[in-house]
Amino acid sequence: GEQVEQRPPHLSVREGDSAVITCTYTDPNSYYFFWYKQEPGASLQLLMKVFSSTEINEGQGFTVLLNKKDKRLSLNLTAAHPGDSAAYFCAVNNNNNAPRFGAGTKLSVKP
Amino acid sequence: GGIITQTPKFLIGQEGQKLTLKCQQNFNHDTMYWYRQDSGKGLRLIYYSITENDLQKGDLSEGYDASREKKSSFSLTVTSAQKNEMAVFLCASRRDSYAEQFFGPGTRLTVL
């Protein structure tokens, strides 16, 4: 079945540093991609979404890049701050009704 | 806008007990989901439902039952609670396969 691999599982950076989280997927019929943020003790909230390889979405200090040829999705943070400390999950939609989630990345931003 | 509510917020049960978790959404979304999240881990799909009275098994359905009584509500039953399934159970819904999911606040299950 569809596999979504997310790396790294843990990421620790200093305030102001950049951070990159990557997901790779296997199903060529995947067409909608999402990043969710889960703050400690809270539920998941949508951070960003991207639908095509020509689309680069930016917001809240993050950039999402999609490379459909390589089946790779990345979440890039250019200047981390402590409020970005959270778990981040990618999710991939394809033709079935259940999105596939990556295993998550726990990001820690130290002052 | 809309909201997903989950009840109860905290659920404490005895080993072997049957326990029910409830989820309500007012988005008018067709598809609803139940996930289990163990501490510090990712999401595992238990059941989902694409419409009223529909049920689809996820990767972790053994030991659980579900019920989609009406479009706005989706219940999950732990048929016989075990100590190794202490976790947070998250309910989610989405409009269609092109859309993002909206998540509820979760129910934290403790088994004594």
Image: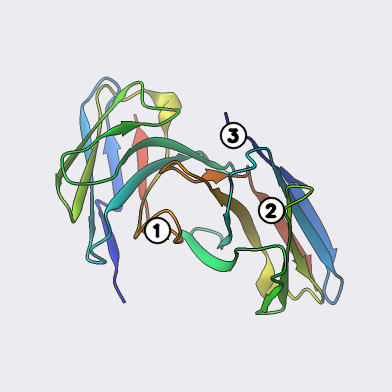
| Residue drawn at (46%, 61%) of the image | B100
Chain containing mark 2 = A
Give the structural element (helix, strand or loop) at label 1: strand
Chain containing mark 1 = B
Residue B85 drawn at (x, y percent):
42, 29
Q: Quadrant of residue B78?
A: top left
Q: CA distance from mark 1 to mark 2?
A: 19 Å
| Residue drawn at (17%, 46%) of the image | B52
Question: Circle 3 is placed at which residue position?
Answer: A2
Q: Quadrant of residue B14?
A: top left
Are both tags, 3 and 1, on one chain?
no
Quadrant assignment for the N terminus of chain A: top right
Pointers 3 and 1 in contact (CB under 8 A)?
no
Question: Circle 2 is placed at which residue position?
Answer: A106
Quadrant assignment for the C terminus of chain A: bottom right
Q: CA distance from mark 3 to mark 1?
A: 22 Å
Neighbourhood count class around disc 1 (C-alpha, 10 Å): few under 14, some 14–19, many 20 upward: many
Three-letter residue code for mark 1? Phe
Q: Relative to B54, is B58 on the left or the right?
A: right
Question: Circle 1 is placed at which residue position?
Answer: B103
| Residue drawn at (63%, 35%) of the image | A3
Give the structural element (helix, strand or loop) at label 3: loop
